[in-house]
Amino acid sequence: MPKEAVVQAKEKPQATHEIPTDLNREGVAEITAALRQLLADTFALYLKSKSFHWHMTGRHFRDYHLLLDEHSDQIFAMTDDIAERARKIGGTTLRSIGDISRHQRLKDNDEESVAPRVMLAELNTDNQALTRYLRSTHEICDKHNDVATASLIEVWIDQTERRTWFLSEIVQGL
Ligand SMILES: [Fe+2]
C-alpha cells in the first residue's frame, strides 16, 4: 500500500461500534425515537421557561423571574441524561437546533410581548404535556424492560408535576 493510502486509511473515521446491550434491536429503535422527541421537547420547554424568565414583567416580577429560573435549571438538567440514555443503549440522539425543531411537539412562543399570566398558563400547559410524554415514554421502556430509563423518567415526572403544581396554583390565583 502506498504511504499516502496508509495515512488516508488511518484517518478514515471508524465504523460505529456496536454498543453492548441485551435490549433487542426493535426495543432500542423504539426507545431511542421516543427519547429523541422527549429531548427536543425538553430543550423547547427549557428555552421557553428561560425566555419567560428573561421577559417577565409586572408586580410579581421577582417571584416569577426566580421561579422560572429554578424551573429552567431543573429542565436543563434532564437534557444530558436523556441524550446519554439513548447512547448507552446503542442509539443516537439530537445533533443540532434544527434537529430539535424537527422533533419537538411543544410549540415555541415567539411573541414580542406576553402577559405574565399568559406566560405562566402556557408553561403550566406545556409541563402537563411533558408529563404525558414522559409517561408514554415510560410505557415504551416498560414494554422493552429498560428499567434504567424508566427509573430516570419516574424522577422527571415527579419534578414536572411539582412545576405544574406551582404554576397552576399561581395561575388560579391570578
Ligand atoms: Fe437569569
Image (cartoon, rainbow, N blue to C red):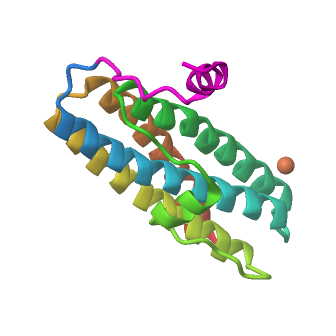
Image quadrant where residue 45 sits: bottom right
In the rendering, at what x and y percent does residue 44 appear? Answer: 59, 59
**Label total for image:** 0
Taking the spot 48% from the left edge, 46% from the top edge, the residue there is: 160
Q: In this rendering, would 170 be left or right of 165? A: right
Residue 62 in magenta? Answer: no
Taking the spot 60% from the left edge, 62% from the top edge, the residue there is: 98
In the rendering, at what x and y percent does residue 78 appear? Answer: 54, 37
Taking the spot 60% from the left edge, 25% from the top edge, the residue there is: 5
Q: In this rendering, would 131 be left or right of 114? A: left
The answer to whether one can see residue 138 in this image is no
The C terminus sits in image quarter: bottom right
In the rendering, at what x and y percent does residue 27 appear? Answer: 20, 37
Identify the magenta region: 1-20
Q: Is residue 40 above or below residue 151?
A: below
Q: Nearer the viewer, residue 30 or 44?
A: 30
Image quadrant where residue 146 sits: top left
Q: Nearer the viewer, residue 129 or 47?
A: 47
The N terminus sits in image quarter: top right
Q: Nearer the viewer, residue 118 or 130?
A: 130
Of all residues, the one furthest to the bottom in this rendering is 112
In the rendering, at what x and y percent does residue 107 appear? Answer: 54, 71
Q: Is residue 119 above or below residue 23?
A: below
Residue 7 in magenta? Answer: yes
Q: Nearer the viewer, residue 128 or 50?
A: 50
Q: Is residue 41 above or below residue 6?
A: below
Q: Is residue 162 above or below residue 81?
A: below
